[in-house]
DNA sequence: AATAAAGTTGACGGGGCGTCACGTCAGAAT
DNA sequence: ATTCTGACGTGACGCCCCGTCAACTTTATT
């Protein structure tokens, strides 16, 4: 056998065509990942699945992201960035704590309904809390809500209770209710937000009747 | 080359010693899995990790379980089986809906505190809802609670609200609060149960002050 | 034009998964 | 007691996925 045969192990046949810019490729990968995650769920999708939904080669993925987890977190960051301005706006606008809580639930349920696949990928297919909370953007989003709650408590708008548990309750109700909402035939984000707000502010015992109501009834319930 | 060389590929060196019974081996694997999942989390543990914590060989695992997911679900089934009698007892004992809800939270938080590793493995490392709800035992546990809620609503103990969302709210609050509870220095399951019950029954607006209280204060708060 | 920098590629080594042919043993059948 | 049989244990194997990297191409710089 000759030298050529021995060294024949190496060598991509043709590499390096660059038809897109760096930013474009990152966006292409992100979009493909978003779509594939939504379809298969986080656990079931492989990096190759993502790349296959793309004109790129497998190695290129790793020029932009360290791992599957990192793309996923990037997607969550994007989502957090999309929601936060709305939450800020809501906080500025709300004059009562009821309005603020209600607006927060509404924004959250609206987001979930607008990006069902991603929400379900979070819920069903991965290290839920770790991925949800480990990135600065997402943490920041939750932190802002917590600060608001603490301020409300300090200002006497809420009784002097444990802000940590209060936060947990809001997050828990929101995520779990969103799950059920999406299973319904025609998810109604306003109904969900109304229910969550009423339950949260008044408790079961003092809950107004909040099921199956139209816009007209909303006034009565909140 | 002769025939022996060709066929030399096969053959475990020494196989088949049977020092334990079938049931014992299943229990050995289950116990090892429970321990390793709690330590490393679901996602991070490999079937080989489980087997390594055992005197058995890798293939044996698959005589008892189809996959990593199946052992995990078996563990959840065991947990569900341990909790359900207590829930039944509580349901029989409780005379008011407050007592029932309070008892349910208490049992749940107690369980979480008694098996932290497993709870965190559920929360942090896997297809949360899928694993939590896909096994008959676990589904049955949730179903019972839902039936209770529907009955309470039908009997007028709760306002006529959406049992599905009510259920979601309870589950959401319980799981998310349990997470925070475990992060505390000295998790206090009674405090957590008191908070959850008060919030749930009365709402934030009507919440008694439920932080940092001893057994004496419990009477006042619930 | 020559050189450097940035970007792309696919083959490769590493490792986990589930299978399977082989080996062993306990108890049933004779 | 001996043979037979099927249940069980074993570890090597083939498959697939992951992340890396040397080779290669294009763009920027001098």
Image (cartoon, coloured by chain):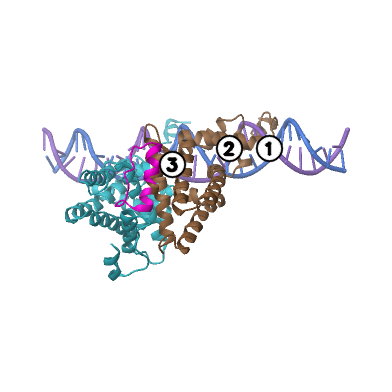
Chain colours: A brown, B cyan, C purple, D blue
- Mark 1 or mark 3: name the one nearer the start of the chain: 1
On whether residue A208 falls in the magenta region, the answer is: yes
| Local crowd size for mark 2, using a 10 Å CA cut-off: few (<14), some (14–19), many (≥20) | many
Badge 2 vs badge 1, beta-carbon distance below 8 Å: no
Residue highlighted by disc 3: A125
Mark 1: secondary structure: helix
Q: Residue A32's image quarter?
A: top right
| Local crowd size for mark 1, using a 10 Å CA cut-off: few (<14), some (14–19), many (≥20) | few
On whether residue A167 falls in the magenta region, the answer is: no
Which sits in the foreground, A71 or C22? A71
Q: Residue at point 61% right, 32% down?
A: A57
Label 1: chain letter: A
Q: What stretch is highlighted in magenta?
A: A198-222
Label 2: chain letter: A
Examine the rendering and report whether any part of residue A45 can be seen. no
Residue highlighted by disc 1: A22
| C-alpha separation, residue under disc 3 versus residue under disc 2 | 18 Å
Residue B35 location in percent, x, y?
36, 55
Asked if badges 2 and 1 are on one and the same chain, I answer yes
Residue highlighted by disc 2: A30
Q: Residue B100's image quarter?
A: bottom left
Residue A8 location in percent, x, y?
66, 32
Q: Residue at point 26% right, 54% down?
A: B101
């Amino acid at each position: 056998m000759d030298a050529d045969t021995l060294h024949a192990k190496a060598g991509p046949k043709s590499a390096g065509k660059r038809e897109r810019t760096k930013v474009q490729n990152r966006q292409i990968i992100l979009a493909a990942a978003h779509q594939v995650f939504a379809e298969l769920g986080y656990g079931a999708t492989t990096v190759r699945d993502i790349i296959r939904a793309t004109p790129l080669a497998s190695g290129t993925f790793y020029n932009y992201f360290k791992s599957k987890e990192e793309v996923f977190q990037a997607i969550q960051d994007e989502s957090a960035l999309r929601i936060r301005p709305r939450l800020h706006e809501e906080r500025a606008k709300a004059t009562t704590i009821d309005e603020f809580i209600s607006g927060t639930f509404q924004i959250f349920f609206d987001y979930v309904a607008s990006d069902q696949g991603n929400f379900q990928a979070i819920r069903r297919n991965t290290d839920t809390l770790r991925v949800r909370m480990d990135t600065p953007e997402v943490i920041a989003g939750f932190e802002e809500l917590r600060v608001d709650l603490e301020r409300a408590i300090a200002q006497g708008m809420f009784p002097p209770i444990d802000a940590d548990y209060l936060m947990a309750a809001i997050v828990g109700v929101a995520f779990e209710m969103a799950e059920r909402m999406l299973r319904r035939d025609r998810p109604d984000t306003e109904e969900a937000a109304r229910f969550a707000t009423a339950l949260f502010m008044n408790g079961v015992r003092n809950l107004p009747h909040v099921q199956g109501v139209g816009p007209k009834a909303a006034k009565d319930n909140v």
